[in-house]
Image (cartoon, rainbow, N blue to C red):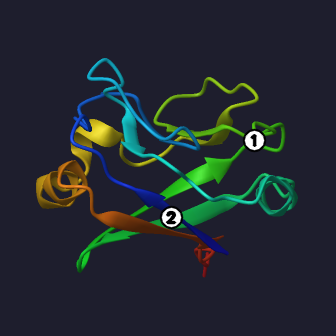
Amino acid sequence: MHFHAQGHPNIKGTHKNTFEFTKADHVTPAGDCIIGINANYDLDELKHFAQNNARCKITLIADGTTETLTAQTNPDFHDDHELVVRIGEHTDKRTFAFRAEKSAKYLRRDLIEKLKTGAKIEIHIEPAEQQRNE
């Protein structure tokens, strides 16, 4: 599954614990975790995907720059305005995934710089490949 969001000049991408996509059409400088506005995700599709409470692979693509990470889906996700990915264990209705490998602060800086210029971002979410124990 995938959705799109838009960059904005106020994007900082400096939050040490989370990154977020919002359906709002702006972000203030205080929103240091927000990396995309005008997100067009489908809540029902994401809720269905998150029900399995499994690892997922999240790929972010902006103007040719790609960042990939894995995280654990939260079956209790149900926010139609904000989608949050967290490094830690905390979950709430806005948390789509937790135990993520990266937060906004650890994303590629060239990706964040492109988002600061208003670049569009594609977000792809798929099941993470299971590791085999042989």
Q: Secondary structure at mark 2?
A: strand
Reading the image, the residue beneath label 1 is: 80
Residue at image location 40% in from the left, 36% down from the top: 34
Q: CA distance from mark 2 to mark 1?
A: 19 Å
Report the side of 55 relative to 108 (left or right): right
The quarter of the picture where the C terminus appears is bottom right
Report the side of 74 relative to 122 (left or right): right
Three-letter code, disc 1:
Asp
Residue 100's x, y, as percent? Answer: 48, 46
Quarter of image, res 118: bottom left
Q: Secondary structure at mark 1?
A: loop
User: Which mark, by number, is residue 58?
Assistant: 2
Q: Is 92 rendered above or below residue 99?
A: above
Residue 49's x, y, as percent? Answer: 80, 62
Q: Is 123 rendered above or below residue 5?
A: below
Q: Front-most of 14 and 119?
A: 119
Residue 19's x, y, as percent? Answer: 42, 39
Three-letter code, disc 2:
Ile
Assess disc 1: are there few (<14), some (14-19) or many (≥20) residues with their C-alpha within 10 Å of its C-alpha.
some
Assess disc 2: are there few (<14), some (14-19) or many (≥20) residues with their C-alpha within 10 Å of its C-alpha.
many
Q: In the image as oriented, which residue stretches furthest toward the front?
A: 25
Residue at image location 19% in from the left, 48% down from the top: 116
